[in-house]
Image (tube, rainbow, N blue to C red):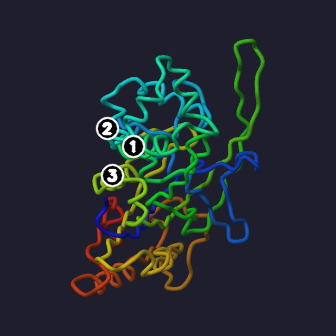
């Protein structure tokens, strides 16, 4: 499985778009109005990663089946229906000679009858079911290997804690919404629908996450999977732009890889070591531009150097940190 525990920091910017709409608030960008900070859920970022991995040819589980949205139950049934009668695949998935023989004994000549035996509140052999589920996750579904899942399917009830976890993201700057515009969609029958289009002016969003070695034993996540995750979280924002998500760009990814014996959280939430505030007004040492005037990275003074210095001081033999992986956009490199 993976070799070490890690913590990571991920920062991206959102310009005149809606990073994460809140369905309970007319799909307005999620906000903490007490602090005027923009919020983005962890599931939104995971969706970006899943979609990017799928685009690159990876098979993911939390996905549509064809062009239709499906329940977890129906998704698993569809997956099983594609592999149930392929002995080579099933043997590799089950990965135990005795359990594979048990599967062959319960398998019917008909796909529906076979799946009915498996997806059942009282499966004929629960150990076979769990072996199949474990094999599917380890060999096919990278998203479950990364993020885990609570499988609430008859005969396959099992909770898998994902090694990769993220907090909700929040903006490092105070965010203001653009005035909403009414959008009109003209339908084929001549009727039209109306809605509101809410967007942030500028949001520099930050996330703290963990990669846990012990949890990788459950899902089978490997170092290769982590490399795929690092690439996906960086590239996925701009890889599949939609109308409301256009103009989102990665700015900084820092991963703190710990030495053996050190666990997640050695430095707490990495976001607590960084700060951002509006730049000083031209010709002034103390007065800063108003929050509402911030339109881009160049309008902010960002302090990441304290975090970098702390991490460097704690890297090496007999220190918590094995290595620090840093990826930065060109305009953010000047800040480091």
Instruction: Specify the label residue 225 is tagged with.
Output: 3
User: Could you tell me residue 116's position as x and y percent?
Assistant: 58, 28
In contact (CB < 8 Å): disc 3 and disc 1:
no
Checking the image for residue 200, the label placed there is none
Q: Quadrant of the C terminus?
A: bottom left
Q: For mark 2, does the 10 Å Cα neighbourhood hold few (<14), some (14 to 19), or many (20 or more) residues? A: some
Q: Nearer the viewer, residue 206 or 2?
A: 2
- Secondary structure beneath dot 1 equals helix
User: Is 209 positioned to the left or the right of 34 in the image?
Assistant: left
Between 244 and 56, the one nearer to me in the picture: 56
Mark 3 or 1, nearer chain start: 1
Split into 4 quadrants, where in the image is the N terminus? bottom left
State the CA–CA distance, disc 2 to disc 1. 7 Å
Q: Label 3: state its secondary structure.
A: helix
Give the residue pinned by disc 1: 135
Q: Which of the two discs, 3 and 1, sits closer to the camera? A: 1
At 70% from the left and 34% from the top, the residue drawn is 183
Q: Secondary structure at mark 2?
A: helix
- Category of crowding for the residue at label 1, using alpha-carbon neighbours closer than 10 angstroms: few (below 14), some (14–19), many (at least 20): many
Give yes or no for contact between labels 3 and 2 (Cβ–Cβ under 8 Å): no
Q: Position of residue 331 (x, y in %)?
A: 35, 61
- Whichever of labels 2 and 1 marks the residue nearer the N terminus, that label is 2
Q: Are marks 2 and 1 in contact (CB under 8 Å)?
A: yes
Q: Is residue 255 above or below residue 274?
A: above
Q: Nearer the viewer, residue 196 or 206?
A: 206
Residue 113 location (% of width, % of height): 55, 22
Q: Residue at x 48, y 25 (%)?
A: 81
Q: Residue furthest left?
A: 317
Distance between mark 3 and mark 1 Cα atoms: 16 Å
Residue at the spot of label 2: 92
């Amino acid at each position: 499985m993976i070799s070490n525990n890690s913590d990571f920091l991920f920062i991206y910017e959102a310009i005149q778009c809606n990073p994460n709409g809140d369905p309970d608030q007319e799909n307005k960008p999620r906000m903490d109005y007490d602090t005027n900070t923009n919020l983005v859920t962890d599931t939104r970022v995971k969706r970006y990663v899943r979609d990017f991995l799928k685009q690159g040819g990876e098979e993911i589980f939390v996905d549509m089946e064809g062009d239709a949205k499906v329940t977890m139950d129906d998704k698993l049934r569809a997956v099983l229906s594609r592999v149930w009668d392929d002995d080579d695949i099933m043997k590799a998935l089950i990965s135990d000679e005795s359990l594979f023989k048990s599967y062959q004994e319960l398998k019917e000549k008909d796909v529906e009858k076979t799946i009915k035996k498996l997806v059942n509140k009282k499966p004929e052999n629960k150990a076979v079911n769990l072996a199949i589920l474990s094999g599917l996750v380890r060999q096919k579904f990278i998203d479950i290997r990364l993020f885990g899942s609570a499988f609430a399917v008859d005969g396959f009830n099992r909770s898998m804690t994902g090694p990769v976890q993220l907090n909700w993201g929040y903006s490092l700057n105070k965010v203001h919404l653009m005035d909403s515009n009414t959008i009109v969609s003209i339908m084929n029958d001549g009727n039209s629908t109306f809605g509101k289009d809410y967007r942030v002016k500028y949001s520099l969003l930050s996330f703290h996450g963990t990669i846990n070695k012990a949890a990788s034993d459950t899902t089978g996540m490997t170092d290769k999977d982590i490399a795929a995750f690092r690439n996906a979280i960086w590239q996925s924002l701009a890889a599949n732009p939609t109308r409301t998500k256009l103009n989102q760009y990665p700015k900084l990814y820092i991963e703190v890889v710990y030495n053996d014996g050190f666990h997640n959280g050695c430095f707490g939430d990495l976001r607590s070591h960084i700060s951002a505030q509006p730049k000083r007004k031209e010709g002034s040492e103390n007065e800063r531009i108003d929050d509402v005037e911030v339109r881009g990275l160049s309008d902010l003074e960002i302090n990441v150097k304290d975090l970098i210095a702390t991490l460097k001081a704690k890297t090496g033999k007999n220190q918590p940190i094995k290595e620090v992986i840093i990826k930065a956009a060109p305009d953010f490199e000047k800040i480091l």
